Amino acid sequence: MAEYDVIMVGSGVAGALCADRLAAAGKKVLILEAGANGIGVAQREQYRRIWDPSPAKSWNTPYLEDVGRRYFPSPATNDTRYFDQPSVNPDKPNDETTSLVTFKGYYQRLLGGSTWAWRGNTPRMLPNDLRLASAYFSDDDFPDGSSVADWPISYEDLMPWYLQAEEELGVAGNVEEWDELTPRDGVPFPMPGQPKSYSDKLLIARMGEISVELDGEQLPVRIFTVPQARNTRFYQGRPACEGNHNCIPLCPTHAKYDATIHLRRAVLHGAQIRTAAVVAKVQRSTDDGRWVVTYKNWRSERPKESSETVAADRVILAANPVETAKILLMSNLGGPHVGKYLMDHVQGEALALAPEPIFPFRGPQTLCGVDTLRDGQYRRQFASFRLTLGNDGWGRAGNPTSVLEGMLNPAKPAEFKIGDQLKSAAVDRLVRLVRIGFSTEQLPHADNSVTLSTQVDELDIPRPLIRFQVHEYTQRALKQGYRVALEIFHAMGAEPHAEELDPDGSFNTVKWNTAAHPMGTCRMGSDPAASVVDKFGQCHGQPGLYVAGAAVFPTGSATNPALTLSALALMTADNIVSQAA
Amino acid sequence: MTGDLRTAANTTASETGSEEAPPPRVDIPMRIGETAAGKKPVGREASLDAFLSLSVAVTGVDEPELPARTELTLATGEKRPLYEIYYERLREAYAPELAQLLQKWVSLGPARADAPAKLAAELAKETDAALRLRRAARQVAKIWFLSVIDDPQASLDKEKATSPTQLGGGLGQHQLAVIYPLMGAPAPGYSNLPHGYWSEIPGHFDGP
């Protein structure tokens, strides 16, 4: 049995950053990855060639032809057949109020993980995001029966690693916009923020200085460039963004960060990678106390029966919240809270037609957002939320294909257009589409969980059994997000598109989607009775077994998790290095 | 349907030895690469010409702006202009509908200034024949604007007219989808513009 200092399970951004830092510190690191793609330029080009002729062009189009995909299924949006998801809560089958909804989170099981297809947004959490319980619920009367808990670290504790994560990923942002909201002691971002789009600038000029009232408190609505891991100049061997408008599913120039960067560095530092390795169990050896990882190799002659093992002093599970929880559950490790408190960012969107051309579909798919509403006393009543200004028309609801198809309906002869009429009408509509998305915080609920299904996948490994609900605390925030979006539309003179709304004109909360930001399931905390890992990601009572990634988040805030989980991963790696020292 | 739509061979008075008027000539769409007795097939050329002028009429985009003559390299290594490639793709998936639309278009006199308006009037009729013409016209529009067409086996949503599945072309066609330059945008994945271009109005945008 080969032996290592550290085995890293999973190679997304958390695993890649951690592995690189540990390998650079001289650790013997092995990365186990379920997928088997490449991490070089040729792989990017191959993905592009798959994507180019495909009519679908959805977030996972480039990756659907990966060899062996049947052995490492990933859930896809609205096609979550990999997940086992009952609609009725099996614990309360007769109670309609506990009926479950479909967890729409999805992820990639590839070398580089979901960062191949992510958008690249990297804002930080706010200081109060890490102390939600004590800041707003001092009487422990948490909404909807949730289990809110403060993080065992403060924003100030995390700051040094936030700065490091921004350097590692190459984050572009404007310090003057963000230093007040997410303090950084005036330290500039590694690169200046992305240039705002023409439509963003127009909106800012039209909107002026407006504020909205949220639960009796006036909060300013300010549009800032979102910090993004997307180059605005040549940085660490990669070019500046050229506005290919293809962030999701694939940046053709590598201006957008993805974890293959740190995987390649890790290899240069001596780390090894084994692909086609789907971990089935982690256990401590009774002989020498080392950790033994058992995995199935789907490239073997008999993948289902394969069983390979490798040992290390430390194991770090960084396989995303769903898969990491599954591994711990299969291994009977981590305690009673493993798999609980699954969260995502529940989203909605508002659509409108601008009064004049604003030219979407140019540049990154989003650039700016409203983050000045993320914190306030209102969080006692409804969830934190933020807004994103789409630069992508109406997204799925309005894009070149859907607009043209609507004007070419064979079943409606009177509306069927050709020639100049078609061209003018289509272009006029497309250049005026404006979308504002709003993303809300979901509180941790023990009932929102990942457990083991009795159904198995192609390797006879249990599939994830998901239970998921969107509670009223979050639903109220969706309505607020829509209300604020309407106010912005009004300020810019845009004509809201009549979506399916409730009779009172407020957002119909069944129209939510998720951001594909799975979080929770192995939450960190100081109390072993209430959490899975400590502040460094080490499992309580299991020295040498760690969790990295968004699985350790006790709460999810309203913002993208990538930078925070990257900072935590670096903190974990540094802690391991300091222990050895 | 991909059949070779040949009719009975054309004959001439000299061949039959008869003084009777020769039977009417029918222009037959032929497969790319096919020739008749080593000569450039007139029928195919006529059909391709008709398809090109039809494409201008349906899209409203003048021929110089349509990338019709941009040559792409096929998987065989052969280079073909885009309009021939698109013609073959449409014949492959919508042969009867395309033939009917081309026939209608030719009957209107493609060179006439009022031909596009007459075609629009034909398409607006509430007849089964017009419905088939609209189906074909939709594909002609989609292939040029988007480089994709509807899967002929799939049914369209009656209200939104969305197609659950579509058929794409080969490498290089998405890049030439005409809707993007009309919007002042590069095709996704194919920006040749400098960093930050999105901050300003597109310089070449002429308006809808």
Image: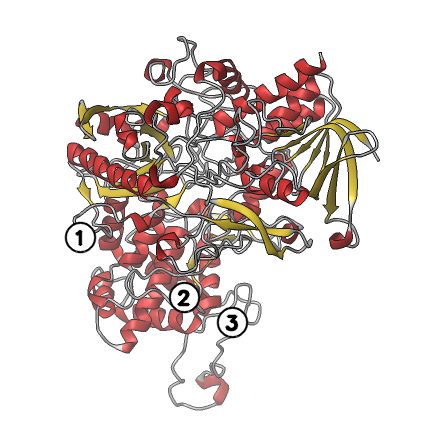
Which of the pair A291/A310 is nearer the observer?
Answer: A291
Q: Position of residue B165 (x, y in %)?
A: 44, 60
Same chain for the residues under marks 3 and 2 in the image: yes
Identify the residue at image location x=23%, y=29%: A203
Q: Which residue is mark 2?
A: B46
Q: Disc 3 to disc 2, how far (Cα)? A: 19 Å
Q: Which residue is mark 3?
A: B2
The correct choice, above or below, for A231 with respect to B131 in the image is: above
The quadrant of the rendering that contains the N terminus of chain A is top right
Taking the image as shown, residue A568 lies to the left or right of residue B60, namely right
Residue A358 visible in rendering: yes
Q: Which residue is mark 1?
A: A503
Q: What amino acid does circle 1 point to?
A: Pro
Q: Position of residue A572 (x, y in %)?
A: 60, 22
Q: What amino acid does circle 3 point to?
A: Thr
Q: What amino acid does circle 2 point to?
A: Ala
The correct choice, above or below, for B49 with respect to A382 in the image is: below
